[in-house]
Image (tube, rainbow, N blue to C red):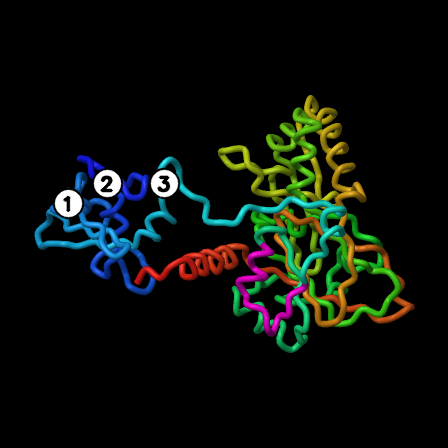
Amino acid sequence: MSNSSFVTVRGKRFHYIWLRDRCLSDKSRHPDSWEKLAQESEHISSPEPLSIEERDEKLIIEWNENPPHRSIFPISWLLRHAYDPQPQSSSEEIILWDKAKLEAKPIEIYDANSTNVSLWISQLFTLGFVILSNLKAENLDSFLSSIGSIRDTEYGKIVTATVGKGLSSTVKALPPHNDLTYCSSHRLVQFIYCSENHATGGESLVVDGFHVAQKFRQDYPDYFKILVETPLNFWRVQHEHQYFFNSNQTIIELDRDSNLTAIRFSQKNCMPHLPFEQIESFYQAYTAFSRYMNNLDYRYCFRLQAGECLLMQNFRILHGRTAFDPNSGSREMRVGYIDWDYFLARHFYQQEFNANQIN
């Protein structure tokens, strides 16, 4: 059914101006990058179809233009990109978890050499972390770089955990935290690769920050609001390179629909510098949230073996480890970061082409 400004396909309405703007032909977009070729000012404000036909699972539109122009849309593509009544989400629904949930159904460890990349990236999206096995140390850089560029830090791209000057280079226990909270953006995938692990202790741990924050929101809505609305300083001093990292951010971030989008939690780097009137209420909220984050019921523990690599959303998953005895055996972990945008891009690419071929 067509209207003066839209057409209905399988119960979904599509405006003509949207269809003309999203035309899939090589005359309208670059065939490789899909970037639109026309400027917004060149668009016809009210495009009109000369004819509309649904044939062979495609919507075919002949536009009233000079020269003539035809748009062909696979019906499956239209339904995937429908915005009636609202745009469809392109990501899988995340799965919130705690210790009991993961121990009841152990997570799958994927073979880095034989598993389809889309499978383990899918788990990275749903659970927030994934463990890969059978990854040789000499292949670590090339394997991860095949997804996206490894971020270069002051210590290099891939460094051993003992290289830095912070707490992570010690043998002490590390409570759950996010990395690089003192940077302007910590929306990264952190990887921790195990070269060898013969020491007593040193068990890895992860916490689903989104799950904890949701529980905290239900139990302490006023405290939750404080952590969403109060920007804090996250600091770190690096004397060797004369760096004083200082980022002003909130602990909990929400989108415009009040959905959780990021957790920034690191007690070792959080340096509140607030007006006098806010200090007491902030610390009440912060201390309560810290108790939740350190609750053992939320903590999933495991021991990384040589050749295994843990990848996690640094803005959702908190990580840490138990203390270890360096005299009991060798232990070497290699650490690095990749921008989350690369994983998003790979994930969306796989969704687009696995669902249907539109060219």
Q: Quadrant of the N terminus?
A: top left
Q: Position of residue 129 (x, y in %)?
A: 64, 55
Reply yes or no: does residue 129 show up in magenta.
no
Question: Which numbered disc covers residue 83?
Answer: 3
Q: Are marks 2 and 1 in contact (CB under 8 Å)?
A: yes
- Outermost residue, left side: 66
Q: CA distance from mark 1 to mark 3?
A: 20 Å
Decide which of 102, 143 is in the foreground and name it: 102
Q: Position of residue 103 (x, y in %)?
A: 76, 52
Q: Are marks 1 and 3 in contact (CB under 8 Å)?
A: no
| Callout 2 amino acid | Val
Q: Residue at x 68, y 63 (%)?
A: 109
Crowding near the residue tagged with mark 2, few <14, some 14–19, many ≥20 C-alpha atoms within 10 Å: some
Label 1: element kind: strand
In the displayed structure, 236 sits above or below 195; it is above
| Callout 1 amino acid | Pro
Q: Which region shows up in magenta?
A: 109-124
The residue that mark 1 highlights is 49
- Outermost residue, right side: 327
The residue that mark 2 highlights is 7
Q: Residue at x 32, y 40 (%)?
A: 12
